[in-house]
Image: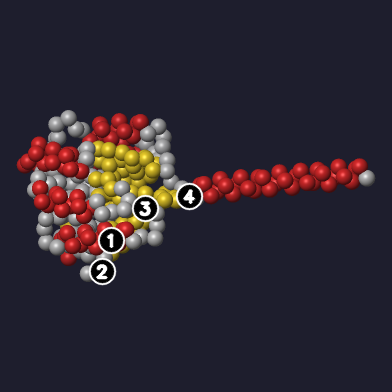
Amino acid sequence: MQLKGTFYAKYMVAGIALCLVLFFAGALSRAKDKSFYFVQITDTHLGYSDHEERLKQVVRAINKLPFEIEFVVHTGDITTDKIEDGPTVAGALSLLKLLKPPINYVAGNHDILRNKLDSTTLAFKNNFGELISQKEYQGVVFLFVCTEPLAGDFSIPSYDPLAELGKRLKETAGKPVVVFQHSPSVEDFYNNEVHPGWERAKEWEALLNRYNVKGLIAGHFHRDEMHWLGKVPLYVCPPVAGHWGRQASFRIYEYRDGRIGYRTQYIPS
């Protein structure tokens, strides 16, 4: 009788152990599969045409999304060369502040102007934030980087995008990183011709590939594109603005298990 009880006790302990293993394995699997969402808007070009109305519709659509959105990022060209125009900037901020999630900004080539470098840089910083900044959401580091000096081959005093990004990447200590910029480094294709990318594109690509960068997200091209910089995927989002007959759009990204997927959403004309 005692042997029989010992036999059942052993199987009971083994059964409990197996249940615990399955429970923790399931918990680890759920943690691994945990995902979250963020949204990109780009190239609003406010102060021109009907772009304010287009942005209003985009903001309303984002606020109605059935997902919990960690943040929104605007990847540049907030205005059309009107970053110093008080009413245009005030209108932009009033519209973007209607977003329910927090918003981050990246400067574009129509925000910081080469022929008015000092004043437009100051205007951007005063209204939209620093030329490089970062946030961390759910263990992922998001870097918002003005790369226009690299794209346009000019200098902003006391700001070197490669050096600044390299410093930030080093400080992430191996955490997964997503980088946002305005103008992509790759060749641009329009009017049935290929146009050169950045002169320092290889340096940029090498820097990104030295760290745990999961994705690079940009605007500027006013098209929906995807490229690879080494092992780093580059996602290019279509615009809010209507230049070249574009339909107003924004993009929802899902970060899951170190990989990024997206859905591009178009606003009915």
Q: CA distance from mark 1 to mark 2?
A: 13 Å
Q: Residue at x 41, y 35 (%)?
A: 174
Q: CA distance from mark 3 to mark 4?
A: 14 Å
Which label lies toward us, 3 or 2? Answer: 3
Which label lies toward us, 1 or 2? Answer: 1
Around disc 1, counting alpha carbons within 10 Å, would you say few (fewer than 14), some (14 to 19), or many (20 or more)? Answer: few
Proximity of marks 3 and 1: CB atoms separated by less than 8 Å: no
Quarter of the image with the N terminus is top right
Which of the marked residues, 3 or 2, is nearer the chain's N terminus? Answer: 3
Q: Which residue is mark 4?
A: 34
Q: Residue furthest left?
A: 115
Q: CA distance from mark 4 to mark 1?
A: 27 Å
Q: Amino acid at mark 2?
A: Pro
The x, y position of residue 74, in whole percent, is: 25, 50
Q: Amino acid at mark 3?
A: Ile
Q: Which residue is mark 2?
A: 268
